[in-house]
Amino acid sequence: MNPTIHDVAKQANVSISTVSRVFNNPDSVGKEMRERVLQVIEELGYAPNPFASGLRDNRSMVIVAMIPDIRNSYYAEMLSGIEEVALSKRYNVIICNTIQNEERFLEYVKYFVKKKVDGLIFASTEITEFYKKNFDALNIPVVLASTEGRAWDLPSVRVDDVQASYDATTFLINNGHQEIGFISGPSHLLVPNVQRYEGYRKAMQDHQVPVSEQHVVYAEMTFDAGYEAMSRLYAKMPHLTAVYAASDAMAIGAMKFLHEQGLEVPRHVSVMGFDNLELSRMISPGLTTVAQNIYEIGKSAGELLFQGIENRDQDLQSVTIAHEIIVRGTVRNRRLKSDSER
Amino acid sequence: MNPTIHDVAKQANVSISTVSRVFNNPDSVGKEMRERVLQVIEELGYAPNPFASGLRDNRSMVIVAMIPDIRNSYYAEMLSGIEEVALSKRYNVIICNTIQNEERFLEYVKYFVKKKVDGLIFASTEITEFYKKNFDALNIPVVLASTEGRAWDLPSVRVDDVQASYDATTFLINNGHQEIGFISGPSHLLVPNVQRYEGYRKAMQDHQVPVSEQHVVYAEMTFDAGYEAMSRLYAKMPHLTAVYAASDAMAIGAMKFLHEQGLEVPRHVSVMGFDNLELSRMISPGLTTVAQNIYEIGKSAGELLFQGIENRDQDLQSVTIAHEIIVRGTVRNRRLKSDSER
DNA sequence: TTGTAGGCGTTATCAC
DNA sequence: GTGATAACGCCTACAA
């Protein structure tokens, strides 16, 4: 059994309140006594029982991160940022893989989150009324990361997807591409796909490049789905010179398909991704992509959450994280006529 | 404020003991009463306060997973397996990124794990006396995943690294390779590098292929380090026909170097990895590698841990997870003379 | 500056 | 089958 506050008190010949004060308000204890107590604490290896303190003041020093799947490096990176702030605040992070599944979410909420948790970072799907209701019932600060709930004004941390997507598309256009196919995430996943589609479309239109539904194809945001989507896109647009995919995983899947078709990237077809996963620099050629500073998103979300935890009735301000085009090797500049094909 | 057991009791006109029983031993409560209570519980949305229960019976329903870095997909995969078992047991998983750093480990132990946690899965470095001492002080079940502590007989879940490495090397030899370079993990990281080196060496010797320190090069087990290690290896062994790297990340880094040197994989040089990260199938050509079923390692470690939690004085048996050679596109069979080079 | 005592919400033991 | 009660360990008025 671990030593309790009583053990310390007895050993140090003081009352338990003194011991408690040494922990929570050291200055209010006489120097000599404080040192005596500290000494005993050290000796016995005493640490306050967190259940007991939790019971009193209802804080667990634990926050929850709800993400679709930790195996997805996007979320691993984000979690890493969250964990970093948490560590600095001496908080723990509990991880929940929701698999974007309402039932699984409920299970977590029911059996875990209700258990007592000081805050929640949610980075799964976009927020529907269902989620909103559950959040409210939890009665703890909630911050969204890389998703959105403006309809219920939940604070969120994310990239400006419209603008980022606009920039990516413009980059392609500026490199002389006109026949630009777009591999979008699934249409049922509103955030961020509506925004990224909008940015793409807007850039095309602003630059007088024709666009239509013929230029786009929808798929889950995974490697395999990207591979398969590319085959559909290629069938629709045999003359495309560039592909812009709404995620790196899809972009790399698309590259695999292209490769198998004997199409070289970027000689025959240019490819642009979104996310800047570590992966994207590992492949050859490196993937040109839009960097989201994902770690920063996690960190920011963590910081926002702690603001909420430390000051419960403060309104949290959503924050936008900057994005950036990372130029590597998958986009060819068609304006340089050096080595032209098609 | 959340409703307490008293609120339910009052509302249902029973004593709190009855309410408690409805939760913990429903059969001991009369049917009629039970239903009345259940109804009120539902109405009020009552859930037992975990601090209070924790205070009584010293269980938090939380376990900890200590890994070097969640951004490393190897550990993300493992964590995912752990989380899955935990969920099924209605436990939560707290994640700790140790960065293989003793100080950081201590910080976690001091401020977090001591908080009360029912078990620990450790997957960071190999176990030194330092770690062992800290584990003992925690006084909770500990299971090692993908690392080893036989010196102190801590239960572990891992692949047979010697055999796996032996198999990988043999595969290369059977494909007609003799000049096989080995990129090892750092020598200060004993597990799993001693074992993988041993397997490599043994296979070479058993097949009468010459080996020496000239064939090996050491590096951190990352992409960048693999890239750099390959340059060293290539300098030492300009005639190598195959490279075997002790991790996929290193193998892919090595491939990048080779690619930049104008050496084609597998035409000029064959490459073999270890781990079978998802990454390894995404690149072109796909990486031939030794699959560890990492998810399974995590799951297994979780199950072992729960055995220990549910039965505190049971001796836990270490388990070995099967490995498998995954043949993709990076190893050329030199015995087929079809398209020979060098 | 230090000590005493009550209460946080639950569960298990005991008595009825 | 049901209810009262002690105990888990801590914190903080409040009293001294």
Image (cartoon, coloured by chain):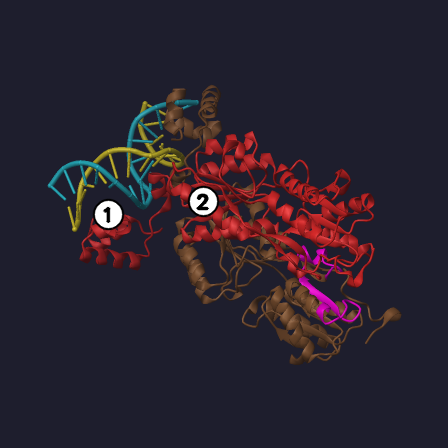
Chain colours: A red, B brown, C yellow, D cyan
Q: Residue at x 40, y 28 (%)?
A: B3
Q: Nearer the viewer, residue A23 or B145?
A: A23
Is B277 covered by the magenta stretch?
Answer: yes
Q: Give above or below for A87 relative to B12.
A: below
Q: Nearer the viewer, residue A252 or B214?
A: A252
Q: Give above or below for B309 relative to B132.
A: above
How many residues crowd mark 2 within 10 Å: few (<14), some (14–19), many (20+)?
many
Chain containing mark 1? A
Is B306 covered by the magenta stretch?
Answer: no
Left or right of A59: which side holds B328? Answer: right
Residue A110 in the image, given as x and y percentages of width and height: 51, 34
Q: Write down the quadrant of residue B123 in the picture.
A: bottom right
**C-alpha distance separating marks 2 and 1:** 36 Å
> Which residues fall within the magenta stretch?
B259-287
Residue B10 in the image, given as x and y percentages of width and height: 37, 22
Q: Residue at x 77, y 48 (%)?
A: A179
In primary-sequence order, the first of circles 2 and 1 is: 1
Look at mark 1 in the image and give the residue it sits on.
A16
Q: Which mark is residue A304?
A: 2
**Is residue A79 in sight in this rendering?**
yes
How many residues crowd mark 1 within 10 Å: few (<14), some (14–19), many (20+)?
some
Q: Nearer the viewer, residue B117 or A133?
A: A133
**Is residue B30 in sight in this rendering?**
no
